[in-house]
Amino acid sequence: MDLSLYVAGWAESAERTLSLLDGLPTDAWTAPTGCPGWTVRDVVAHLAALESELAGTGRGGPSGAASNGGEVSAAYTEAGVDQRADMSPTELVEEFRTAYTARRAALETLPDDPKAMAEGTPGGIAWSNEVLLRNRLIDMFVHEQDIRSAVGQPGGYDGRAAVIVVSGFLLALPYVLAKKLKAETGTALVLEISGPVNRTVTVEVGEDGRGRLHDGASDDPAAHLSMTTETFVDLVAGREILRPVSITWTGDSSLVGDVLAEIAITP
């Protein structure tokens, strides 16, 4: 994907998040979010930590903590939040805003090679430019939704960020069906997403045992699963769902149950 689309989606979500934070009452900062164990304040501290490290502003990333493998480690993430335990909500927002502004200016010039290793990543993790910018968009948008759900201010699904995140999350379905669930060859599941981002897709296990995704509904799926855009994002992101859920299905209820139990793919 064009790197500029990731940057535009990330910037859109960051600006909406900052606007939301500017209007939060004091008691909202202690509200629990769907991100397990984190309050609104913790989420904002996390965003401030990551963006500050990438921008080289504020307190930056946590010292003495590094990421391993292909994902940002939980210890590293928690360390960035703990490093800001003494900061007020106003200070956290200001650090976040300063870092975002600096990072946005730096990204006016995009990397030449999306596949090349990024020069700066959270905890020094080995991510390409494309993976870094894609993951920052996903992280920003999902945490924007964490905050919105916690404080009862829905929104943010009418822009490009939501479309990119939903499209990216759908690409995880073949892995869920074929690898996590080890569904039999020929097993097909139709997923219908309705709401701000509408998509209907079929995920199917081929003769080679690999899962494949295509647009549209299969004629004879093992199950047909329907849910709202917001519910889909919450489930794939592994969130404790704080808003109303609307899930319906027909067909193999055991398959549907297994998919819902294993659909979360974010660490």
Image (cartoon, rainbow, N blue to C red):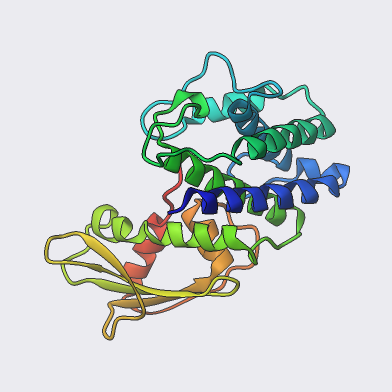
Whether residue 136 sits left or right of residue 225 in the image: it is right
Q: Position of residue 39 (x, y in %)?
A: 69, 41
- Name the one closer to the observer, 108 or 14: 108
Residue drawn at (47%, 21%) of the image:
66
- Name the one closer to the observer, 184 or 80: 80
Q: Position of residue 200 (x, y in %)?
A: 42, 76
Q: Is residue 84 something that shows in the picture?
A: yes
* Above or below for 116 versus 35: above
Figure disc tally: 0
- Name the one closer to the observer, 233 or 168: 168
Image quadrant of residue 213? bottom left
User: Considering the image in quadrants, where does the C terminus appear?
Assistant: top left
In the current view of this chain or complex, which residue is farthest to the top? 64
Residue drawn at (78%, 36%) of the image:
93
Residue drawn at (39%, 29%) of the image:
126
Whether residue 197 sits left or right of residue 208 in the image: it is right
* Above or below for 35 versus 102: below
Image quadrant of residue 102? top right
User: Considering the image in quadrants, where does the N terminus appear?
Assistant: bottom left
In the current view of this chain or complex, which residue is farthest to the left? 207
Q: Is residue 42 something that shows in the picture?
A: no
Q: Position of residue 203 (x, y in %)?
A: 30, 69
Q: Position of residue 241 (x, y in %)?
A: 59, 57
